Amino acid sequence: MTNDIVALIDYYEKEKGIDRDKVLAALQFAFLSAYKKMVPGAEHITELRAAIDTKKGDTTIYATLNVVADGEQTDKWNQVVLSVAKKLNADVEVDGQVEFNVTPKNFGRIAVQTAKQTMMQRLRQAEKEMIYDEFKDRAGDIVSGTVRRFEKNDVWVDLGKFEGKMSSRERVSTEEYNIGDRIRAYVVAVENEQRGPEIILSRSHPNFVRRLFEAEVSEIADRTVELRGIAREAGYRTKVAVSSVDENVDPVGACVGLRGARVKNIVRELNNEKVDIIRWNDNPEEFIHEALKPATLRSVSLDEEKKVINVTVDEEELSKAIGRRGQNARLTSRLIGWDVQVRKDESQQEEFEARISNASHGVGDQLGIDDELADKLFRAGGATLELVCQMPAEYIASAIEVSEEEAQEILTKAQAAQENANS
């Protein structure tokens, strides 16, 4: 064994964390492979082993041969006659076994160079197995690392001994990463693929927010407060529904923290993503009022068969209820598990139109014109006979689209009716 191999063992043991026995096993396998390549016919030997003296740096190859009677040897690679075997071990008998040192005289640097590639392959496989063993139970945890490199849109993160991959779909579209940046991410899965284990990381997963709340809010960690649901559009907005098993604990207040300290820490980690914390209610009709805040709802109706909630709001509240790019309504739908339909309340407009219709009809009766002309006249400012009398005939003609003669006739009737009303 040469110094570079010794250094390689130290590197994999100390830097990569691979068990020393596994490193030595890889080296033994590599030397046996090298021996079989160097010695013609060695591949026929059934029992070979490599003994490595880690202190002196010597490597010895041993072959275990079966002892047969003199003259009965049929397999020169795996058998030795008794007379030869006794020279090595006087006590051996026929059908016994003897281990011979079969190390070639030139077995050294040449063997090291031949063995090195095989050893590296085995060590890389051992490293992959170690990654899987260490991380297979960490799926669902948050880990910290440093951005190491980019491959297309994928970000590779240095996790210490290992690397994790954050694909483009697991990134947050509003975040920019640079080599050397320190980031935290959620371990989505550890996949043991044919090419080796792969640690899949995410910063966009809803459970990333869940783990941040569990780490920041002690009441969630001890299960006094329960996270009932999370809906997220990473980089923009997240809605979190919480409830409490203790009526004396305010779940929303516990998550917000004193002066907002707890939620501020979470928002800071999410790069100022908006986080809404909502008190959970098992009644969808009541929960929707909390979920769509800050909008004030005028009415809520449920279609339980189709799992649809129909919500009406005043016109000035519509943009609040729907939210920017529809986020508020969309996230609420995901959170509650119902299709939330938000519409403008038309009842006030309908009531207003009905009042106009009634008023214009009354004026029309007095002037002897139909409802269509009366409505046009009303909307042009002729809400009463007195106001009609103040209108010039040409204005009336233009407003309700009649001839000036007809307009003059309407004006005359209005003046007469007004005089009668005053007399």
Image (cartoon, grey):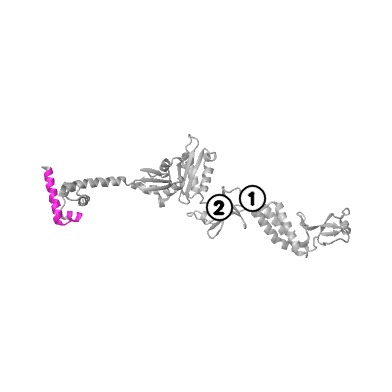
Local packing at callout 1 (Cα closer than 10 Å; few below 14, some 14-19, many 20+) is: some
For residue 413, side relative to residue 52 (left or right): left
Local packing at callout 2 (Cα closer than 10 Å; few below 14, some 14-19, many 20+) is: many
Q: Check residue 409 for magenta coloring.
A: yes
Residue furthest out toward the front: 305
Residue 257 visible in the current orientation: no
Q: Nearer the viewer, residue 59 or 232?
A: 232
Residue 86 visible in the current orientation: yes
Q: Nearer the viewer, residue 315 or 120?
A: 315
For residue 304, side relative to residue 149 (left or right): left
At which x and y percent is residue 221? Answer: 54, 40
Residue drawn at x 81%, y 59% as measured from the top left: 78
Tell me where residue 1 sits by quadrant: bottom right
Q: Nearer the viewer, residue 180 or 400?
A: 400
Which numbered dot is residue 201? 2
Residue furthest out toward the left: 423
Q: Which residue is mark 1?
A: 133
N-terminal label among 1 and 2: 1
Residue furthest out toward the top: 248
Q: Check residue 157 for magenta coloring.
A: no
Q: Amino acid at mark 1?
A: Asp
Q: Amino acid at mark 2?
A: Leu
Residue drawn at x 28%, y 45% as measured from the top left: 351
At which x and y percent is residue 339? Answer: 43, 48
- The magenta-colored residue range is 395-421
**Local secondary structure at mark 1:** helix
